[in-house]
Every structure is written in structure tokens, then in C-alpha cells.
Amino acid sequence: MDAVEQIVLPERSRRMPMSRVIGAYLTEMRTECVRYLRAPGFMLPVLLLPTMFYLLFGIVMNRVNGPDALRFLLASYGVFGVMSPGLFGFGVSLATERDNGLLTLKRALPMPPGAYLLGKMLMAMLAAGVVIVLLLVMAVGLGHVPVTAAQAFQLLVTGMVGVLPFCALGMFIGTLVKGQGAPGVLNMIYLPMSFLSGLWVPLSMLPGALQKLAPIWPSSHLHAVALRAVGLSQDPVGMHLLVLAGFTVLFGVLAARRLRRVG
Amino acid sequence: MEQPVATVASLAGAVKRYGALTALDGLDLMLHRGELLALLGPNGAGKSTAINLLLGLVRADAGRVSLFGKDPQDIDARRRIGVMLQSAVLPGTLSVSELLRLTMSYYPAPRTLAETAEMAGVSDLLARRYAGLSGGQQRRVQFAMALCGRPELLFLDEPTVGMDIDARRKLWAAIRQLVAEGCAVVLTTHYLEEAEALAQRVVVLAKGRVLSDGSVHALRSRVAHSRIRCVTDLDAAAVAMWPKVTSAVREDGRLEVCTEAAEAVVRRLLDADPALSELEVLRAGLAEAFTEITREESNEQEAA
């Protein structure tokens, strides 16, 4: 097939060398990160919300309960903080860019497949990493929580990889809602889900029915993983990781299908 | 081997429906190498749908769409095109050079940043953030993104909207340079003088079909009318009765005569009024031709 086309159009055989394809992916990712790091309207809420919550409800108000309360809240607000770059970074930007023609232009241009989504994914992972680092610095510096290097590292990895299911969910919402409506819809998911997963108030203090409901929220599974990372639980997390991976694949596939069909 | 070498993209019997609305109704269109084709038509004629099919943004319900002998959704085919869409909001926090470098990275053998910027007239804007640019400057940046990949086929959707006259002329010059290099260009525009200034071939669409396909000259000659304007005391109603005169009216103290035989009518006018002055004869432009053709179409539709 290819050989025939070459004969039909002999002018220039335009093969894209693999090195340039990789270069295109890297440029797309770097540009996507730079673009959001320069947008205070995106970065400030993502960084400030979890850190302010941790400062107020953790370090200021919970000091009396000792370092274990602060350690617990480090995991909780870590998960809370990781959810937002995933949900909003993907959901809001996808909804906006579907609306304003940028996605259409990118689809018309020879951007390598998936580069657009990979760029956003990397950006969300970076933002999640920054949130976790900020929380760790506050926990150790201000709250004097004894966190080992291994625990800090585990929490960082949990945050940066744990953002992915929320990227997938945000992406799915972004394919359903267009433009201005997305932040509202995402907050309707983000805030109740955080509460119902025991990120603000420990699950054990919620009504029994809500406790039973918790496993359907991906954030409750990530919470379990984060608690283990900071050393507050010894329960195996294999099942939680599986659920999170399944959740990521499910919503990722749903979103990709919708994107291909509607654009 | 069916396609001749010169064809870079084609639609053959392309049909696209959106619910009950038929946007394209069996459209045939060939794009040739080194040719600037202007795609004209009233709103809803199917221009955007035709372009979206060629860009692989939508799928045809029937018919064949080919871009460099391939499916337009094949990335290898799209690596040979450049695109400037009518409405795309680019990330405002990026600088012009970042936007250009990103777009350049998609192509196998792009122009250099300096060459791209020079051709599109954005050399002085490279360090600026996109959000801080005026509408016309943003259009120029989008044009730079369209040509940076050394495309063999360039899609320009209303490229000069929001540009001042000077910027528009510069963009026209850049487009002519690209065509001279052998690049094929598809241009949609609402400015008929733009099509007249640039296009070798004009395709007029209406209701998803090709209404007229030919050179600017051929299109204009479909409308045989010329307009004669002059300052004279002759009575408009009397002139209107002359043979070959379609209409004659007095406007702003001038007589305006519409005719198929400009030479004969001018001779008679000069004979009838030796004091006649400020004589002008205007051939029908693309605008008149376009209005005429689309009106004929709608008359036929009503008659049918």
C-alpha cells in the first residue's frame, strides 16, 4: 500500500523520524506544564486549598491531639489535594478547549496521538507532587510530625500516581460538559466525594450507611493507600490499588470513546 | 494510480448529514498542487463541513475523502498540511515562540523559527505572551503556525478577519509566496476581494453542492453585466428604455446604467449628451457574480 502511495506522490517522502516523534511528545508535555504553571487561576486554588485546610484544621486546631492526628490529616489532605489537579486540570481544561476550538485545531494538526492527554497527565502529576511536598514540609516543619524519608517518598509516589484515576474521571466529565459549566459540575463531585471518603472527617465518625458506601469512591481507596504510606496502617493495599487502576481504565476508556466520537 | 500526480486532496460524492440537515449532498472537489482555491458560499453552504472532512475532523456518511492518497485521519497525511482555523483560542500564557516551537515539533521537516516568523510577519512578537496580542496579531501567529511545518497543502479559514489593511496585504503576499513554492491552498473567506486578489480557482458552494467551479475570470464572465456611471442631464427613465439596457437609475446626481453591452451604450450616451463627464465603466466583480449565482440558485429552487 505504502509503496503505491510513494509512486503516486514522489515529490517528498515525508517520514517522521522516531526521534522527532519523541521530541513532539516531550515538547507537548513541557508546553502543557509551562502553560499551567504560569496560570495563577489554576495553580493557586490547587495549591492553596489543601495547604490552608491542613494549616487550619490540622496544625492550628488539632495540635492537642498529638502527632498522630497530624499524620492522619497529612494523608487525608494529601488525597484531597491530589484530587483537584486531576479533576480540574483535566476536566476544566478539556471542557474549555472542546468549546474554544483548541482541541479541534490540535486534532487537525499532526500532533502525535495522545500527546495532548499525556501532556495534561504529566502536568497533573507534577501539580500533585507539589501539593504533597508542600504538605510534607508543613507537617514536618510546623507540625513536628516525625516522617521518615521512606514514608515521605511513599506518600509522594502515592500522590503523583494516585492523581491518575482523578485525571480519568475529570477527563470523562470534560467530555460531557462544555465550557463554563465544568468547574461547577466538578465541584459537585469533588467536595461531596472528599467528605464521603472521610477526608475531612474520619470515616468512623460518619453515619454507618455512608461508611458502607465509601468503597465506591476512588478517593477512599487512595486514602487507604496514603494512610499506609505515612505509617498509620499495616493493612494490605493490593485490592485498593486494583480498584484504583480499574477505575482509571474504565473512565479513561469511556472518555477516549466519547472524544473519538464527538471530539 | 487512479489519482493524477497533481491532486493533493479530493472529495468524491461526499455526503454528510447532521440529523435532518444535509450539510454536504454528494460533493466532488479536487485540490491541485500549487493551486489556490477559494471556497465561497453563503453561511450553511457546507464550506466548513467540506474542510472538516478533508482535515479528518468528521467522517463522511458516504463518498470518498482522500488527503495525499490517504485517509485524512492518517497522521502521515496530516503531516503534509498546515491549518489555520477560524476560531481557535490558543493558550494565552504561552509566548509566541513557544507556540511556534510546539507546532513545529509536530512536523518532520519544519521551517526554522526565524523563517516562519519572518514569513508571517511576527518576528517582533516572538517573546510576547499570546494573550497580550491584538486580534490581528493573534491571527498572524495562527498563520505562522499554519505555515511552519512546510506544508504542501494549507487550509486557511477566514484568515484575515480582524486584520487591518496593511496586515492583510502582507498576509496575501505571504500566501502568494507559498503558492509560488508549490503549496496548494484552500481559502474560505467572506471578503470577495480577497478571493479575487488571490485565487486561481473559485468554487461556489450552496446547499452542500458545487454551484460553480472555475477561474475568477470564468466566474465573473457568467455575469455579463457592466455598470456605467456618469454625470449627465439625460433622463434616467428614457435611458432605461434603450436597447440592451437592463436598468438606469439616478443616484447622488449620477446616472447609473446597468447593461450587457457597455461599448454600445457608452457610445450612445456620449452622442446624446456631449457635456457628459466623469464617465466610469465597471465590470461585474466577484461580488456581483457571487450574488447573481446564488440568487439564480434560490430562484430555481423556488420555481421547482
Image (cartoon, rainbow, N blue to C red):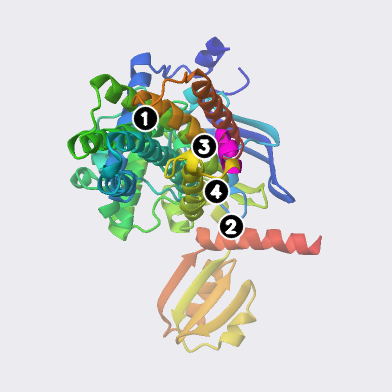
Front of the two marks 3 and 4: 3
Reading the image, the residue beneath label 4 is A177
Whether labels 2 and 3 belong to a single chain: the reply is no
Reading the image, the residue beneath label 1 is A159
Query: Circle 2 — which element?
Result: loop
Is the C terminus of chain B in the top left, top right, bottom left or bottom right quadrant?
bottom right
Looking at the image, residue B230 lies above or below residue A138: below
Whether labels 1 and 3 belong to a single chain: the reply is yes
* Residue type of the residue flagged with mark 3: Leu
* Residue type of the residue flagged with mark 4: Val
Residue A104 appears at what percent x and percent y? 49, 41
Label 4, label 2: how far apart the Cα atoms are: 27 Å
Check if mark 4's residue and mark 1's residue have beta carbons within 8 Å.
no
* Residue type of the residue flagged with mark 2: Asn
**Disc number at residue B214?**
none
Whether labels 2 and 1 belong to a single chain: the reply is no
Pinpoint the chain carrying mark 3. A
Quarter of the view holding residue A144: top left
Residue A199 appears at what percent x and percent y? 43, 41
Label 4, label 1: how far apart the Cα atoms are: 26 Å
**Disc number at residue B43?**
2
Front of the two marks 4 and 2: 4
Q: Magenta part mainly helix, strand or loop?
A: helix
Label 2, label 3: how far apart the Cα atoms are: 38 Å
**Residue B117 visible in the displayed image:** yes
> Is residue A215 in the magenta section?
yes
Q: Which residues are magenta?
A: A209-216
Reading the image, the residue beneath label 3 is A169
Pinpoint the chain carrying mark 2. B
